[in-house]
Image: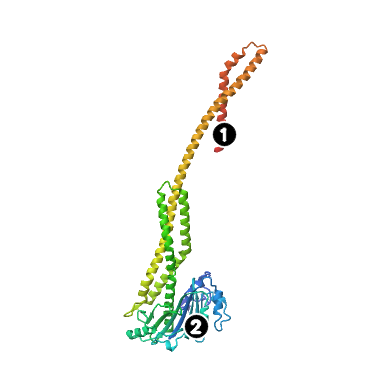
Amino acid sequence: MAASRYAGKMLPMNVTAPAPTARLLPDDDALRAMLHNEVHARPSARVRLPALVIYVAVLNEGITREQECEHLRRLSGQQDLTPERLQGNFLRLRFENYTVKWERHTEFTRYSIVQPLPERAWLGASDPELLSALVLAPEWLRDIPGRTIAAIKLVMVHGDLSTPEATMAQARNWFGEQPIVASVMGNNGHSWVATDFQLRDSGFERLLIIAPPGTSETRSGRISQRLLELETYRLMALRGLPVAKGLGPMLSEAERQLADITAQLENKSASEQGLLDTLVSLAGRVERATAEHDYRFSATRAYHTLVEQRLAELREQPVAGTQTLGEFLQRRLSPAMATVAATAQRLASLSERVSRTSALLRTRVDIATEVQNQQLLAKLTRGQELQLRLQSTVEGLSIAAISYYVVSLLLYAVKAVKAAGVPLDPEIAVGALIPLVLWGVWRTTRRIHARLHAGNQSSAS
C-alpha cells in the first residue's frame, strides 16, 4: 500500500494528517492555563555583575493593588500603568540602566531595584556607603505603601575564589571588620555569600555575594533571589514568636484554672452551675485565642519550611574560620520555631482538655438530672397511688350515696303503690330491695369504668 510520512510515522494515503493548529484535546479546564503558568509567575532576574540590589519587603495588610500601582506610577515613564498589569502578582519594569521588580504575596509585597554597583563599593572597599548611589529618589523608597519587614542592600561583585584567606579578609574589611558568617555555595563552589545580620542606622542589612568572572547573569539572578527570599521568610517566620510569648501567661492561667475545675468535679458538693459558668468563660478565652492566632502559627510553620528549603538549595560548604549561614540560623532560628510550635501545641492541647472537662461536667449534670427525674417520678407515683386510694374511697361513698337516693325513690314508689290499695309494707319491701340496689349501682359503676378504660386505650393506640 502506498503511504506518506507524517511525524516520523507511516500513515495510509487515505488518512489526512491534522493541521498543525488543529485542536487535538478536549476543552481545557478553566484553571489549566493559570495553573500551568504559575511555574513562570515569578521568574528570576538576570543580574550583571557587579550589581547593587536594593530590596524592600513590606507588610501589605490593608494595602490594595491600586495603592501599589499608584506608587509605581511615580517611576519615570510609568504614568499609564494600570492595576490590571498587577493582577498577576508580578511585574518587572525595565529602565535605561536599572530594573524595578514588584511582587505581591499573601502577607507582604517585595520591591527590588537592580542597578550597577559603583566602583567605590567593589570588593576591597572598607564599609562602603551604598544608598547615595541609588538611582531612584529616596522619597520613592520611603513612600512605599505598607510597613517594612525586611530591607536589604545586596551587593554582587567579582572576586578570586582560589585564594580563600585573602578573599575572606577582603569580605571582613568590606563589612567594616564586623563579625560575619559566610558560606561557599554550590557543590562546585560557584560563589560565596557573606553577611553580618546587622541592621544599620539606615534600616537596611547587607549581603555580599562574591562570584568569579564569567558567572552568568541567570545564575546571579537565581542566587540573589534565593538569598533575598531566605531572609524575608526568616523574618516572616519569626513573626509568630512575639505572639507565642504573649500567649504564655494566658495559657498558664488557663491551665491552672482548668486544673481547679477538674479538681472540683471530684467534689460532689460543688455547684454544677458555678463550674459550668467558669468552664464556659475559660472555653471562650481559649477559642478566641485559637481563632486569633492559629493562622499566625500555621504561617510560621510554612515560612520556616521555606527557609529550610532555601538553605538546602544553597548547598552550603564551610569557609575556614567562620560559621555558615545555615549553622548560624539553625542556632538562632530553631529555638524560636520550637517555642512557636510548643505554644501552638499547648493551645491545641488546652482546647482538647477543655472539651474533655466539658464532657465530664456534662456527664455529671446529666447524672444529677437523671437522679432528680427519678425522684420526681417517685413522688408522682406516690401521688398517683394516693389519688387512686382517694378515688376508691370516693367511689365507695358515691355508691352508698347513689344507693341511698335509689332506695329513697323506691320507698316513695312503694308508698304510692300502698296508697293505691295494694297491701304492702313499704319499709319491709324496700328493705328487701336494698342489697339488689347496692349490687346494681356497683355493677353500673364498674361498667362505666370499663368503657372509660377501653376508650383511653383506643385513643393511645
Give the image's coloring scheme: rainbow
Q: Is residue 126 visible?
A: yes
Query: Is 105 placed above or below 406 here?
Result: below
**29 and 332: which is toward the camera:** 332
Q: Residue at x 48, y 42 (%)?
A: 373
Image position of 444 (left or right of 212): right
**81 and 178: which is toward the camera:** 178
Which residue is the site of mark 2? 99
Q: Residue at x 57, y 18 (%)?
A: 434
Q: Is residue 46 visible?
A: no
Q: Residue at x 44, y 50 (%)?
A: 361
Q: Give the structural element (helix, strand or loop) at label 2.
A: strand
Q: Give the structural element (helix, strand or loop) at label 1.
A: helix
The residue type indicated by label 1 comes to Gly
The residues bearing labels 2 and 1 have C-alpha atoms spaced at a distance of 96 Å
Q: Residue at x 38, y 67 (%)?
A: 338
> Dot 1, crowdedness within 10 Å: few (<14), some or many (≥20)?
few
Residue 124 location in percent, x, y? 38, 87
Residue 178: quadrant of the picture: bottom left
**318 and 286: which is toward the camera:** 286
Query: For residue 455, which numbered disc appears in the image?
Result: 1
Residue 267 location in percent, x, y? 40, 48
